[in-house]
Image (tube, grey):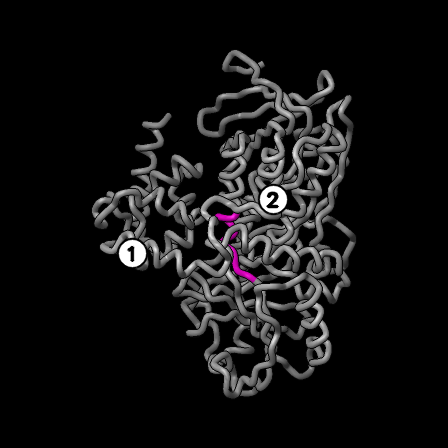
Amino acid sequence: MSETGSELGIHDIFVIGGGINGTGVARDAAGRGYSVMLAEMNDLASGTSSAATKLIHGGLRYLEHYEFRLVHEALAEREVLWSAAPHIIRPLRFVLPYQKGLRPAFVLRTGLFLYDYMGGRKLLPPTRTLDLRTDEAGKPLKPGYRTAFEYSDCWVDDARFVALNALDARERGAEIRTRTKVTSARRSQGAWTIDIEDMHTGVREAVRARMLINAAGPWVDHVIVEALGDNGAHNVRLVKGSHIVIRKKFQHDRCYFFQNPDGRIIFAIPYEDDFTLIGTTDQDYKADPAKVKISEEETNYLCKAASEYFREPVRREDIVWTYSGVRPLFDDGASAAQEATRDYVLKVQGDAGTGAVLNVFGGKLTTSRRLAESVLEHIEDILGKRGAPWTKDAKLPGGEFEPLAFDAEVEKLKRDYPALPPALLKRLMGHYGTRARFILKDAKILADLGEMFGTDLSAREVDYLMEEEWAVSADDVLWRRSKLGLRTAEEDKARLAAYMAKHQEARV
């Protein structure tokens, strides 16, 4: 029974976790006609899903570990996801310099041949060979590098990818609760009774659901132990990945894929116009996922690995921001963290008569839509089939234009809002797509958007994020719904926090 006085109606599905797996499942299930509720104890994408390398990619290095099914699925998904969200997903060319003594050239060529033809590539351009002595990509590199292979993958704004899945889920009927913690879950009368607590107000409720989806990411085993009472749970291998962000290291718009003598790889990616993102690391992690942060060892490793390639070394003082995340990989017994499978594993306990739970282990941004479809197959087996699979050809909110039409959409905004800064319009299109107009509305000049918080972040945009995208804190806006925190002064962050607190209080 709820402390507010009445128990909520029974849902078909209750999802624990507001990362890409949880929101993807909620979206697919709601679109098929299931009644869905999702609870996330913090903000959307507050864990692993906002700490990725920001790529939609096939996983070239996974071929070395013979994960052909995963690579094939991921390659096939690149253009599906790009088509669904061309505002937050964009094609990116990767430059892989050949280095004598590491992977042989024929191995790289063979891997890239498979990469080009395994996934049904249609719009992404194929692999080509570069002469680094004459190509612009060679200019930032040390002069000893002569040959490179250039291939295609995609870049994604990972946290916005999660937010858009949640938004689409809600618009299709799902109930999305952020800052809501599941404190326990128990089977009763052939279904689940789930106790939840609002982390702001402390209000507790008991909700009912026919099936439970545990998509808690790094906390998936914790949910199994603490909420479900299975003390023997040990299914995930936590692997920490850390990244550094430095001032822009090169002028072109391509990404570098650097091999290291230890067999690991790192990327150097153009990031937020003025920066370069370098990562990632792979280290086993045993501590609290909520307290993950980059170590001195990782910082030194990334600086040293990148400096092996760049003419100008990457120094610690170049770093403007770091972030770390914990990948909840399925524990397959691999000897090294970088060798552990990136594939997802789904395990079901119980049935329709007793109350079923499906636990999600592993997964990645690129295959999240396919993971959701696999989860729905299990849901259909247990609860019965509703609607047919639908997400492959569906757009995410704001993505209602063709994959190659992003620049044309920006130009439309510029024509319709000629007095607003072009850089603002391009950023809004890159964050919200066609829904940028939901923020701009009838604005004629910048002042029409209200108070500005240091950069081009306006009160109108903040209001939209609070009303439509579950933003509560300044960090939600500056580091998850955007990366404007890279450019926002402390006094502006404080003004934003005060503004949001005032308006949050008024809403409650």
Give residue 254's position: percent from left, percent from top.
50, 71
- Along the viewing direction, whichever of 96 and 491 lies nearer the viewer: 96
Q: Residues within 10 Å of mark 1 (few under 14, many from 20)?
A: few
What segment carries the magenta color? 154-161
Amino acid of disc 1: Arg
- Residue 155 sits inside the magenta stretch: yes
Q: Which residue is mark 1?
A: 415
Please determine whether, in this image, residue 358 is positioned above or below residue 57. Answer: above
From the image, state whether disc 1 or disc 2 is nearer to you: 1
In the depicted view, which residue is nearer to us: 86 or 348?
86
Q: Nearer the viewer, residue 33 or 507?
A: 33
Which of the marked residues, 1 or 2, is nearer the chain's N terminus?
2
Give the residue drawn at x 38%, y 37%: 466
As rendered, which of 470 and 436 lies closer to the eye?
Answer: 436
Per the model, the C-alpha gap separating discs 1 and 2 is: 32 Å
Q: Which residue is farthest top? A: 5
Residue under pointer 2: 391
What is the three-letter code of the residue carrying label 2?
A: Thr
* 502 relative to 174 in the view: left or right: left
Residue drawn at the location 52% of the way across and 32% of the way down: 176
